[in-house]
Image (cartoon, grey):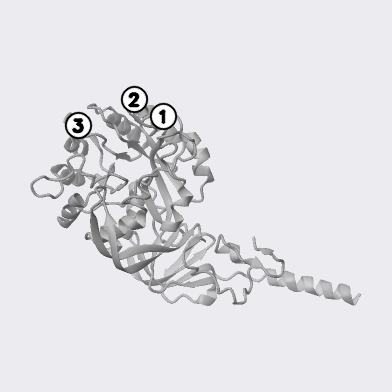
Amino acid sequence: MKKLISCAALALLTAAASAQPLPAYDLLLRGGRVIDAKNRIDAMMDVAIKDGKIARVAPGLAPGDAIKTIDVRGMVVSPGLIDLHVHVYNGTGEKGSYAGDLSVPPDGFTFRAGVTTVVDAGCAGWRNFEDFKDRIIDRSKTRVLAMLNIVGAGMRGGKWEQDMGDMDGEATAKMAQRYPGLIIGVKAAHFSGPEWKPIDEAVIAGNRAKLPVMVDFGVDQPTRPLYDLLTKKLRPGDIYTHMFSGLRQEQDPASKGPSKAFVEGRARGIYFDTGTGGGSFKFMLAVPIISQGFKPDSLSTDLHTGSMNSATKDILNVASKMMAIGLSLPEVIADMTAHPARQIKREDLGNLSPGSVADIAVISVQKGRFGYLDMVNTRVDGAQKLVAELTIKDGKIVYDLNGLSALPWTASPGDVKLDPRWTTFPRQDPALGVTAR
């Protein structure tokens, strides 16, 4: 009988403990430099997270109010980064195709760079988007959004990408309308002919679906000059990527600053994106154009199997490079958060507003001597390099470079039962001998 009473008492104590209210916050980041362009914050503050959402951003929040508190003093706390231009339709096995072997798996390249959202820029068209969705979007931890290629077959190489018969604005719009918020734009890319059809059809799709158009203008043709693209064909809110490639008359030959097309295009409301890629960024353009006050609206990588190991590497390398040639830290953070979110009409992302999804990048600013490259293998030296220390997606840690969230192995683990509320790497429960879930 005593044994039964003891067991009952233990059960009651356990139930009472489990009924204890949770702390106010799941996770608290203390003492970092919070840069949130949308909310015009650039100050030392704490960021509190609860149930996958931003709960509060303010100085002096109490560590005792959180299940887990992490000291991020000396680091930048930013909204999770958005890479506006990537290629991630990987896994089909198609050789030499961005709907195949030239694309990269998103989760292998995002969290380690502070990126929580990517925009696949046209790998799939309306014909193969649902395969892309099933194969990549629905299986990735990274938030993968998409711009549909105006070519129905997508970005599969020359014979497909030059097929004007497969450029269909109406069909593209219908597929985009089937997946609102997931398909967030239309892409025209790599066209080498003299005709305007890919641009015209992309704009038709953009108008029907109320989405922006992003243009990689392909081969420079006298019959379709950049000036006409930016001042006549595209609409306010459309996006010109590869802005520093020098392949399509982007630079004024006399002043070395922005071309007339750029200046008048921006005045009309066209956005300009870096999309550095493997062959779309030269210092000989970027340095004088930026020095004359024409700065990017967004930073992106054009990430693929070529650019990931060449001059681009990842988005923080691009941001560090841009800081080396004249952009400030707050500018590059804005160009990877609030600005791309605005361009793709997903302003629920890219900010730390209370109630917003808790996607966060904790970034260290390393000091030293660093070399940054361009597409023609010339170098600029910089004194700063941005490094992702901690990445949080939907309120949970998904990447921790130096163990900011971890205790020394010799320390008492304490209560591990609530770990799954703040991390995707829960510790082992010593009482059970298993990992907490």
Residue type, mark 1 in image:
Ala
Q: Say whether marks 2 and 1 touch (CB < 8 Å).
A: yes
Specify the quadrant of the image occupied by residue 155.
top left
Sequence-wise, the earlier of marks 3 and 2 is 2
**Residue 429 seen in the figure:** yes
Task: Please tell me how crowded label 1 is: few (under 14), some (14-19), or many (20+) other residues with Cα within 10 Å.
Answer: many
Q: Residue furthest front?
A: 377
Numbered tag placed on residue 184 in the rendering = none
Residue under numbered circle 2: 163
Which element type, helix, strand or loop, lies under badge 1? loop
Residue under numbered circle 1: 153
The quadrant the N terminus occupies is bottom right
Between the residue at mark 1 and the residue at mark 3, the CA separation in whole angstroms equals 24 Å
Residue under numbered circle 3: 221
Residue type, mark 3 in image:
Gln
Tell me the residue at 88%/75% (across/down): 3
Sequence-wise, the earlier of marks 2 and 1 is 1
Q: Position of residue 424 (x, y in %)?
A: 56, 59
Q: Is residue 85 above or below residue 204?
A: below
Between the residue at mark 2 and the residue at mark 1, the CA separation in whole angstroms equals 9 Å
Q: Position of residue 348 (x, y in %)?
A: 42, 53
Which element type, helix, strand or loop, lies under badge 3? loop
Sequence-wise, the earlier of marks 1 and 3 is 1
Q: Position of residue 295 (x, y in %)?
A: 22, 54
Residue type, mark 2 in image:
Asp
Image side of residue 185 versus residue 64, left or right: left
